[in-house]
Image (tube, grey):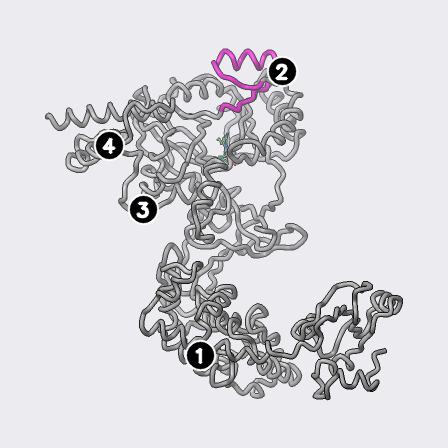
Amino acid sequence: MAIKEEMDRLTEELKVYQDKYYKEGKSLVSDSEYDRLSDRLAALEREYPEYAHPDSPTKRVGSDLTNDFPEVRHTIPVLSLDKAYSDQSVLDFFSRSISKEGGALSFAAEEKIDGISMVLYYEDGILVRAVTRGNGIIGNDVTSNIMTIHSVPLSIPEKIDIAVRGEVYISKEGFEAFNASESDDSKKAANPRNLAAGAVRRQKSSEAGLVPLDIFCYEGFWGDKSLTPPDHLHILSKLKELGFRINPHLAFFDSSAELAASKLQSAGLEGEAYAFFGIDTFIKKKTEERRSLGYEIDGLVFKINELDVRERFGYTEHHPRWAVAYKFESPQAEARLMGITVQVGRTGRITPVAEISPTKLGGSTIRRATLHNQEYIDELELAIGDTVSISKRGDVIPAVENVIEKNEEGNTTYRIPDVCPCCGTELVKIGGLQYCPEYTCPDQVKGRISFFASSDQMDIETLGPKTVEVLYNAGILRSIEDIYTADFTKAAGLPGLGEKSISLLIKGVRESVSRPYPVVLSSLGVADIGRKSAETLAANGFDSIGKIMAAADSDDASGLTAIPSIGDVTAHNILEAFRSERLRETVAVLQEHGLHVSADMDEKEEELEKTLSGEVWCITGSFENFNPRSEALKEIEKRGGRTVSSVTSKTTHLLAGKGGGSKRAEAERLGVRIVSEEEFMKIIGMDGGEDRKEKEESGQLTLF
Ligand code: IVH
């Protein structure tokens, strides 16, 4: 019995310390003493679980056991809210409700916290379950993670059954601090809500406990109906009394501001008091205040105060008839999730993509949006048929941001299949992401080839993803090295491949042979070698693929890790990649065909004589041999010339192609030499002609 007594005593003592610390910011004991007591209690609880208190303070620390978030049925309907987008429609909601009731009503207004909806279930005053909204009927049990939130009471002072709804969120400050501490960009959260959603579903509660989650509670459902307070204000004050965290930014609307104020006061609550017609002032004020709040809100929620009226008004299938959410305008659009397709990237990475009803956003019509990975889908609890909000992240890639309304078909959260949708190979999981491990998986092969040929890489303009697809299917192009060994004339007649495009393709492939070494290196598609890191490698001793392979053979990462931007993991990954026989075969064939597998092969280009040094060139019109015309600018710069975008008195030459108006006129006015394309070809020696300066001097070269 001594054990049980010690555990009871420790539990009580630690509870007092925690309360003082988290509610009043006071430490009653030193950190080390606190840790000692807490470790002792945790050890005893492991040994004598039968004596452990369900609301033990050790639950706050979390555990290293893996969570599996079982599905559980809600015992209250977890509904969403009807929406309003203007002051007027909120006012309409007020008047519609009042005339329907045929009597006086009052309304509470709360901030709509942009977080994760949560239901906390207490039995006999003890927190027994914390459940996500899920589809409103069934959600996931995330209790151990939610227990790490200090503002969630593990027990309440009354031995009652109660379900409490609230929003789990993370402050703007907490979000910034988290992202600042995460050096890996790909692990940074896109916004506070995503970070909170991820934390709620962390596999280990000890890890969830590291994220500064918090909660605001806003609804209570008493098991014993007779205990239910008569109105919303009293529900809030009761929840507060029971130890729940209530948002202090409350407003209350009644027929007069005085009446509203007195009701707030009699419920013992602080808040702003308004008459119904004050709605526009209130909304304007909150819209402005929004930015300076410490957490994100996406709207305001207006709720009928009187509980008996709520009962009479009831619910639709999806929302209560006694509340409405005013949504702030945002550059987001709503769409229906029609389906999810699963893409296989060039590295085998599996990416789910949302197929949505065509939706206008930011000037374009969007049909697809990224869903990142299974974890992201789980965080959103996304199911086919749901209504979702879409945003354009960084104004480019559309992303599914949130579920606005659950589907009515009863579809549950989508799961990516276990096998590759392209080749059927069983997927593997690496660091929360799924991969197809089959190197010859057609989607991966096509992806690798397209990446190699893309404009940021080897820039084989005529070899886009569609052409790659056609050539792959015809069996002509089955690997990167095939680009240099295939007989493309055999492709004549294939869709989109006439004689002309084939000769352009052959020309493009031939030109690509002289791309510089760092470009070749990054085009191989090794996960950790992008354009920038390829250049870093080249500049730091790894100036040939051979040298990287030698390091791989001797498993010597020291040369790589000596480069400041390369860490141990990246170095290991690079070496691992260059041990692959397949990659080595590719490199061997590329080398055979004259591609720059070492930096010394690049030097020829760099050593061009600086024949244009001291000259300032401007360019206008379009060209036959330089398309895009920036190619001509490159030729000038390679020869030491400077290029400018407008003609001024400092400009020495205007390269004038077809068309081109105002610059030519300006050049004429300023007496700047105007050079035609044909002459330019001669100047830079691309016509196989003789030395230009000589000709210029002997007057053979006309510059007008
Ligand atoms: S009341 C039946 N109050 O908004 C009661 N919801 O779009 C319905 N939310 O699922 C909820 N702050 O997750 C309510 N002060 C607040 C809220 C709030 C955020 C969320 C909640 C709900 C969603 C509806």
Q: In this view, does 459 lie to the left or right of 653?
A: left
Disc on the earlier residue, 3 or 2: 3
Question: Helix, strand, or loop for circle 4?
Answer: helix
Residue 412 visible in the current orientation: no
Disc on the earlier residue, 4 or 1: 4
How far is disc 3 from disc 4 in space, using C-alphas? 26 Å
Q: Is residue 671 left or right of residue 35?
A: right
Q: Residue 68 carries which label?
A: 3
Check disc 1 and report the residue beneath it.
Answer: 587
Disc on the earlier residue, 4 or 2: 4
Between 482 and 446, the residue placed more toward the observer is 482
Local crowd at mark 4 within 10 Å, few (<14), some, or many (≥20)? many
The amino acid on which the numbered mark 1 sits, given as a three-letter code, is Val
The amino acid on which the numbered mark 4 sits, given as a three-letter code, is Ser
How far is disc 3 from disc 1 in space, using C-alphas? 45 Å
How far is disc 4 from disc 1 in space, using C-alphas? 58 Å
How far is disc 3 from disc 2 in space, using C-alphas? 50 Å
- Closer to us: mark 3 or mark 2? 3
- Residue 250 included in the magenta stretch of the image: yes
What is the span of residues highlighted in magenta in the rendered image?
Answer: 248-272
Q: Residue 255 carries which label?
A: 2
Q: Does the residue labelled 4 lie within 8 Å of ligand 1?
A: no
Q: Which mark is residue 38?
A: 4
How far is disc 2 from disc 1 in space, using C-alphas? 79 Å
Disc on the earlier residue, 3 or 4: 4
Between 487 and 99, the residue placed more toward the observer is 487
Q: Do the residues labelled 3 and 2 touch (CB within 8 Å)?
A: no
